[in-house]
Structures are given as structure tokens and as C-alpha cells.
Image (cartoon, helix red, strand yellow):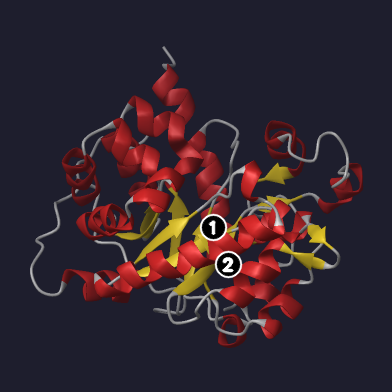
Amino acid sequence: MLTRRDALWGGASALLLAACSGDGDAKQAMSDAVSYKRKAGQPRVGIQTYTIRDAMEEDTRAALRMLKDVGYDFVETNSRDFTRIPMADLVSALKAADLPVAATHVSFDTFMTDPQMLADQANELGAEYAILPWTPDEMRTTAGYAQLAERLNTAGGVMNANGLRFAYHNHHFEFWEIDGPRTGMDILLEETDPEKVWFELDLFWAALARQDVPALFRAHSGRFKLCHIKDMKTDKLGDFDPEGPNALNFDEIHKGLMVNVGEGDLPFESWLQMDEVSGIDYLITEHDSPPAPFRDSVGTSLKTVRGYAL
């Protein structure tokens, strides 16, 4: 009988992979292992665990083993991963699956109140980056983004002091004009210290905001150390009105526009070939609402990215 687990994961292998030894400089070893730069002719590719959040909630160990079995080199975690279960259990599951953590998304509330806690969490995971993935509605103003930039600088300083880096992950709304032609993303890029704050460019959301991605790379060379790769059928882009009532209907956007990498037509290969300009080190696939079985969805995205000439 086909179980819910089979439907979600597509029959993930039950083989438990050997745990990491933990010897040597763990963070340097992780960085070497997951760098996007070519190794044996192929880019190293990770995945944001939010993609398979339902599977992670049902059986974290099996979900992570599936990602490793499919062929991912590393993961990017998010705060729900280590608030739903104890951090020690998550770290144990990651080691059992032999999946290093390049970065983790963090809680906005903790970012505002206790950046040291974020640093402690990221270090426990062995991550290089802690990343803020969200700006709440009430801060999407000129004053709000300026306050956020100041807070990003503060958190970035804390991360640097703890051997980490801090970054910001965009959606589409950061690229909307707020007062005149200036956008929230303009403020964040211009008012954060490039020695303390980097960016994880979500290419889907940038495309949805009608951004010229190569021009963005050139204007802010070296600031984009990570990226999210999730695809879009751009023939449907005309149906999205950024000023309409559904501009922030994420469920509609996810299901109406977002597809597995390779099933849309965003020009990722040409964008990613600009890594010497953009600064991108980490390639991370993501899908906010992937079709089941998840194994097939994440496998399609991985195979596509591995096929790029980078």
C-alpha cells in the first residue's frame, strides 16, 4: 500500500549513512565541501529544507537521508527546523545523513532581540551564514528599511565576532518603490556595511519584481554570496499585477508561477556564469510549494542545476 511517506518522498532509501567524524577544522571543511565552485566539473548544489517542510516534520531523519540519496551536497536550514525539535536532534540527523549546513534562515524576532543567540545557533549547526529571510509589513517603509539596515549592521558585527557571516534574503516586495524611485532593496544595499552584511538573492522573487539581474550584480558587485534557484513559467508573469490585490498572495504565487528548476524558463545558467561579478559562492535550490513526490521534484531541480556549464 502506498503510504503518505511514500507519496511525499518517493520511496527514500532507508540506508543510514555514517555520521561525520567532526575531526579537524569543521567549518573550513564544510566551506570547502559546499563551495559552488566547480569540483570535478560540477557545481556543488544545496537545497533549502523549507522545500520539504512537510517531510521534515513527519520524519526529519528520513527526509534528510532522501536529500542526500538524491545527490544534494549540503542544505540550508531554517528556524522551524530547530524550533520544532531540539537543536541537538537536528544536528544528529544532519550528521547521520552526511549533509553539512552552509547557511540557516533565522527568526525575525530573535534577530531583533538577541543576535548572539542566532550566532550560537548557526555555530551549533556548523553554518557559515545566518540569514534574515523576511521583513514584516509594518517595516516596509523608508524609515522601516533604514531601521532594518542599521539592525542588519549590528547583527552582522555580532556574526563576524563569532566567526560567521550575516546575509539578507529578498522577496519581491523589497524591489517595490516606496518614496519616489527608491526601493527597500536600494536602502538595504546602500545602507549596510559590505564587511558585515551580504545578500542571498532569490532569483525567482527578483524576476517576479521585473529586475534586471545582471544589472543588479554589476551595480552591487560581490554582495550576493548566496542565491536561491527556483523556476518560473514566465509566460504567466503577465498575470501578476505587483500593485493588485493579490500582490502578496503567496499561496497563489507559489502555485500559479513557481515550478521545479528546469520546468520554467528563467535564464539561470547565464546569471550564474556571472559569479565573478555577483560574488555567488552557494547555489541553493528551493520550491515553496513543490508537487509530490518530493523526491522527484527536488531531483529534477538538482539535475537541472548540475547540467549548467558553470
Residue at image location 68% in from the left, 32% down from the top: 251
The vertical placement of 232 against 6, above or below, is: below
- In the picture, the disc for residue 303 is 1
Q: CA distance from mark 1 to mark 2?
A: 6 Å
Q: Could you say which quadrant of the image residue 156 lies in?
A: bottom left
Dot 2 alpha-carbon crowd within 10 angstroms: few under 14, some 14 to 19, many 20 or more = few
User: Picture coordinates of residue 39 (x, y %)?
Assistant: 40, 78
Q: Nearer the viewer, residue 309 or 282?
A: 282
Residue at (47, 75) in percent of width and height: 281
Q: Which residue is mark 2?
A: 307
Residue 9 visible at all: no
**What amino acid is found at the position of numbered circle 1 in the picture?**
Lys
Residue 277 point in image, percent of width and height: 61, 86
Left or right: 22 with respect to 142? left
Q: Do callouts 1 and 2 mark residues in contact (Cβ within 8 Å)?
A: yes
Front position in the image: 110 or 277: 110
The x, y position of residue 106, in whole percent, is 40, 50
Q: Secondary structure at mark 1?
A: helix
Residue 122's spot in the image, x, y percent?
28, 57
Residue ID at (14%, 51%): 18
142 over 289 or under it: above or below: below
Q: Assign the C terminus to one quadrant of the image.
A: bottom right
Q: Residues within 10 Å of mark 1 (few under 14, many from 20)?
A: some
